Amino acid sequence: MAGMIDARLAELSIEVPEAVAPVANYVAYVVSGNTVHVAGQLPIADGKMQYVGKVGDAVSIEDGAAAARLCALNIIAQVKAACGGDLDRVVRILKLNGFVNAPGDFGDQPAVINGASNLIVEVFGDAGMHARSAVGMGSLPFNASVEIDALVEIS
């Protein structure tokens, strides 16, 4: 039987992918007590980086927001794995840390990371309302446009 969050995902026509495997010497998430710490997720789909380059230069703000949304989808996939497939165990999305690969004078990081925040709230409703950081970076792994990590409370 599908849970409430799975039903909401179906209603939104959102398919959660398989959790992306780590690309270096770390784990994709750590569960400690009732908290899931999700490692930084990149805008990867079907095993391939989808958004490469600096936002505000080679990548538009709109594409940066799409990259952030994809990172959030990958966060949901990691949380689903951490919860044994049951996203109804999510009590609250506590915090997102959003990193935007951008030129030094770029100042629209919040607009980019809204792509992730909007998806999280769409999926989890009030439980998705989270604290957040949105910061610019001189570079990111594999020249990804965006990277986001998360802190999630589960039951």
Image (spheres, grey):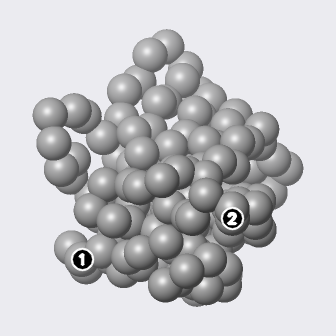
* Quadrant the C terminus occupies: top right
Q: Residue furthest front?
A: 105
| Residue 16 visible in the snapshot | no
Q: Give the quadrant of residue 140.
A: bottom left
Give yes or no for contact between labels 1 and 2 (Cβ–Cβ under 8 Å).
no
Identify the residue at image location x=67%, y=80%: 61
Checking the image for residue 142, the label placed there is none
Q: Is residue 106 above or below residue 53?
A: above
**Lateral position of residue 96 relative to residue 101, left or right:** right
Earlier-in-chain disc, 1 versus 2: 1
Residue 151 x, y percent position in the rendering: 58, 33
Q: Residue furthest right?
A: 126
Residue 90 x, y percent position in the rendering: 61, 40
Q: Is residue 132 above or below residue 139?
A: above
Q: Amino acid at mark 1?
A: Lys
Label 1, label 2: how far apart the Cα atoms are: 26 Å
Q: Amino acid at mark 2?
A: Phe
Q: Which residue is mark 2?
A: 106
Identify the residue at image location x=24%, y=77%: 48
Identify the residue at image location x=76%, y=66%: 108
**Lateral position of residue 152 relative to residue 73, left or right:** right
Q: Which residue is mark 1?
A: 48
Dot 2 crowding, Cα within 10 Å, few <14, some 14–19, many 20+: some
Q: Give the quadrant of residue 7.
A: bottom right
Name the foreground residue: 19 vs 91.
Answer: 19
| Residue 49 visible in the snapshot | yes
Residue 15 x, y percent position in the rendering: 46, 77
Q: Secondary structure at mark 1?
A: strand
**Mark in the foreground, 1 or 2:** 2
Name the foreground residue: 122 vs 62.
Answer: 62
